[in-house]
Image: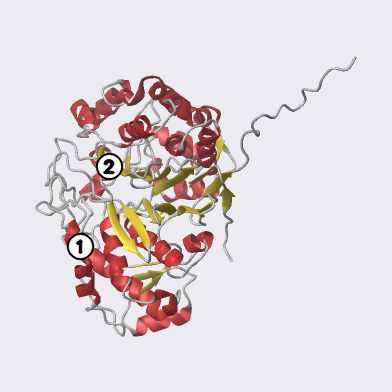
Amino acid sequence: MTEKHPATGHRGMVVTNHPLASAAGAEMLLAGGNAVDAAIAALFTLTVVEPMMVGILGGGVAQVRLADGRHVIVDGLSTAPAAARPDMYRTVSDTLPDYQETIGRENHMGPRAVAVPGALRAWCHTLQRFGTMELEDVMQPAIRHASRGWLATPYLHDCVEDCASDLVTDAGLSATFLPGGTPVRPGSRIVRAAYAETLRLIARIGDGALHGGPLGDAVTDHMAAHGGLITREDLLAVAPIEREPVRLFYRGHEIFGAPPPSSAGVHISQMLHVLEGFDLHATGFGTPDGVHLLAEVLKMAFADRAVATADPAFVDVPVHRLTSKDYAVSRRAELDMAHARNWGPGIGLTESANTTHVTVADAAGNVVATTQTINSLFGARFAIPGTGMIANNYMYNFDPHPGRALSVQPGKRVFTSMAPTIALKDGRPAFALGLPGGLKIFGSAMQAIINLLDHRMPLQQAIEAPRVWTQGHTLHLEPGISEETEAALRARGHAIERVKTVGGGMNAIAFAPDGTMTGAACWRADGTAVGLGGGLARAGVRFGLEPVRR
């Protein structure tokens, strides 16, 4: 029994983590736009209605599958400012669990936590390269909701409540999301007038409004006045990179994932190659053996992740070795089904779980899966005065210790677990999916793939099914994993922790051979699937033009 219900359509499908963003994407498809137009419209709308997760001062990764069969990864991740240095933070500890913490939380909130934003320029680049509509047109839903307002959801209320003690320190965020000093109530109307003007400016003049224009001046002036590092030159220098996806074959499907600095494609490939040596369908979902295998391959992946997630412009990433079948065979031989192994925890860096994801498809065969974020809830917990733009805290993703593969370096892209994934069967799209959730993203995406291809679940069940996660320490289990399985896992040496959720709201589309699309969003966020049916009138129809009788 699933908590939500899927949508079906033949003319297109939009799945996002907010109903108004899904509606914005559907509006573009109905107006004649393609999947790229719809995805960009949805993302701009999410910056309004899901502001705690995504913004034009953030960054992210998109996979675009074009109707002609090409797959392109658009890397719009944020970068360290030119003035950033490996020793710019004073660290608290050299060991877990405080490894990534710094004195004064400088890498977590405030101006020194802000990396150079890549989102806006990447979205504009993607629209111009692969879309069909004008920027001003795809931004209209976002402008409309920012200026007229929208109704707060319980999910937004809970997110505001979680970080209210930080938000209250910023006048702009406090006025909008803590009216009267209390978190915005579900059902109350939120208007973001200043941000609406920011969006109107971008709609008129494009990404130059931020990268070299008045919005950029507002950012750099605020940084200069409050100890931040981002300069006008940083904003002018940032640019998206088009990359080749990581490709693997699993259970008769060709699966495309994001390459470094995303760890998703490499480690999903690594884990699936190990698991293909087991009959997971016969093993069963949620069984002690099934969960044990998931836990062990997750630990393998994180043991290797420290050398496979850095910006490839700075670190030689061994992609081919980690994704090779031979490597999987050697790792599979080390598995012990009776005992949990210590595969090594890597360096134990953390990543924010507060992200968003959009999956869109059109009738022509274009598919977009894109994951975007400002990193933590409400990013660095401040907005640029007079603009409504919420700053990211992407510097938190770097290792604050110098001399490491993931240490801060000028111009270096942040590492990420974002996993926009598209799978083909016999050369045709079979499914596309992605989700927010920080370090838990690529492991959750891998589990959804297994649910679809090994356990043969329907799409809605596959993305809602209970998840597990471990980085090499405790094994997190969602409530749906049985107590009997938990007891058996403890007996094998797993340290168990029960959690409410593993990762965030997954958004997915499945494609049937007859052209039917099924869209699904899971219970872990405000996700909504909108499918398009119907169409234009049959050619030659002239309804109502009866001859006049005299």
Coordinates of residue 169 in the picture (x, y in percent) = 37, 39
Amino acid marked by disc 1 = Leu
Q: Quadrant of the rendered structure where residue 334 is? A: bottom left
Residue at the left extreme of this rendering: 403
Q: Which of these two is toward me, 64 or 223?
A: 64
Neighbour tally class for label 1: few under 14, some 14-19, many 20 plus, Cα within 10 Å? many
Coordinates of residue 250 in the picture (x, y in percent) = 34, 64
Q: Which of these two is toward me, 447 or 197?
A: 447
12 on left or right of 131: right
Q: Quadrant of the rendered structure where residue 225 is? A: top left
Residue at the right extreme of this rendering: 550
Residue 248: in sight, yes or no?
A: yes
Element at label 1: helix
Coordinates of residue 11 in the picture (x, y in percent) = 55, 42
427 on left or right of 78: right
Amino acid marked by disc 2 = Leu
Quadrant the C terminus occupies? top right
Q: Which of these two is toward me, 49 or 304?
A: 304
Residue at the disc numbered 2: 77
Q: Quadrant of the rendered structure where residue 135 is? A: top left
Q: Earlier in the sequence, mark 2 or mark 1?
A: 2
- Disc ID at residue 322: 1
Neighbour tally class for label 2: few under 14, some 14-19, many 20 plus, Cα within 10 Å? many
Residue visible at 44% across and 66% down in the picture: 451
Residue visible at 22% across and 55% down in the picture: 100
Residue visible at 23% across and 67% down in the picture: 325
Give the mark toward the camera: 2 or 1. 1
Residue visible at 40% across and 58% down in the picture: 503
Quadrant the N terminus occupies? bottom right
